[in-house]
Amino acid sequence: MLVCGRCGRRLTVRYKGNGGIYPVYECNGLRHDHLATTTCVAARCDLFDRTVSQRVLEIFQGEHFHLGLQALEELESRQGTVDQQWQLRIQRAQYEADLAQRRYEQVDPANRLVAASLEARWNEALEHLEKTRQQSVEAQGRTSPTVTPEKRQEIRMLSHDVPRL
């Protein structure tokens, strides 16, 4: 999150002093490019960490959690639309299978060639119906989990206490 004021690169953490127990933000961009012999910037982490964490907490106020909940509700709404589309596909396949069955049943049994072709169409329609049902079940298995009202309330409560979170 911190950027060097001299070279524009991101600061990295180095551990120094007493066996490497003191973290320091440091930039070696110019030294790495052989444009300088010293580091661009070096500062103790504890001086920046408080300021950075306060800024992060300012950014992540409760309204951001509410936006997340709204996005989740939108995803659930879209999933409902997808489920409805699958139901319409199944209904269409069922209608085609029923239509093929009626046509087969209405044919004159003496006309074997027509009866055989209508029976093949009916079998194809039944296979298509079964395949559509299986695809629907697989698609519903891949859906995102829904959030219960209790979980929503818990998220709303946490959104008011971001520092504790």
Image (cartoon, rainbow, N blue to C red):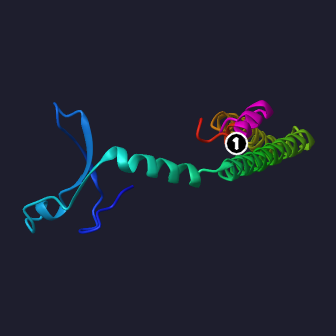
Residue at image point 68% right, 48% down:
62
* In the displayed structure image, the side of residue 98 where residue 125 appears, left or right: left
The amino acid type found where label 1 is placed reads His
Start-end of magenta stretch:
144-157
Q: Quadrant of the N terminus?
A: bottom left
Q: Main secondary structure of the magenta part?
A: helix
Residue 34 placed where, x, y %? Answer: 7, 65
Q: Secondary structure at mark 1?
A: loop
In this view, 111 is above or below 19: below
Q: Is residue 126 left or right of residue 98?
A: left
Sort mark 1 into few (<14), some (14-19) or many (20+) by Cα contacts within 10 Å.
some
Please say whether residue 127 is visible from this viewpoint: no
Q: Residue at x 32, y 46 (%)?
A: 45
- Residue 5 visible in the snapshot: yes
Q: Position of residue 92 (x, y in %)?
A: 82, 48
Residue 141 to residue 51: above or below: above
Task: List the residue tagged with mark 1.
Answer: 160
Q: How many numbered discs, if any?
A: 1
| Residue at far front of view | 47
Quadrant location of the C terminus in the rendered image: top right
Q: Position of residue 132 (x, y in %)?
A: 71, 40
For residue 110, side relative to residue 73 (left or right) = right
Q: Which residue is pictured at 19% across the width and 34% down the height?
A: 20
- Residue 147 highlighted magenta (yes or no): yes
Along the viewing direction, whichever of 14 and 113 lies nearer the viewer: 14
Quarter of the image where one finds residue 90: top right
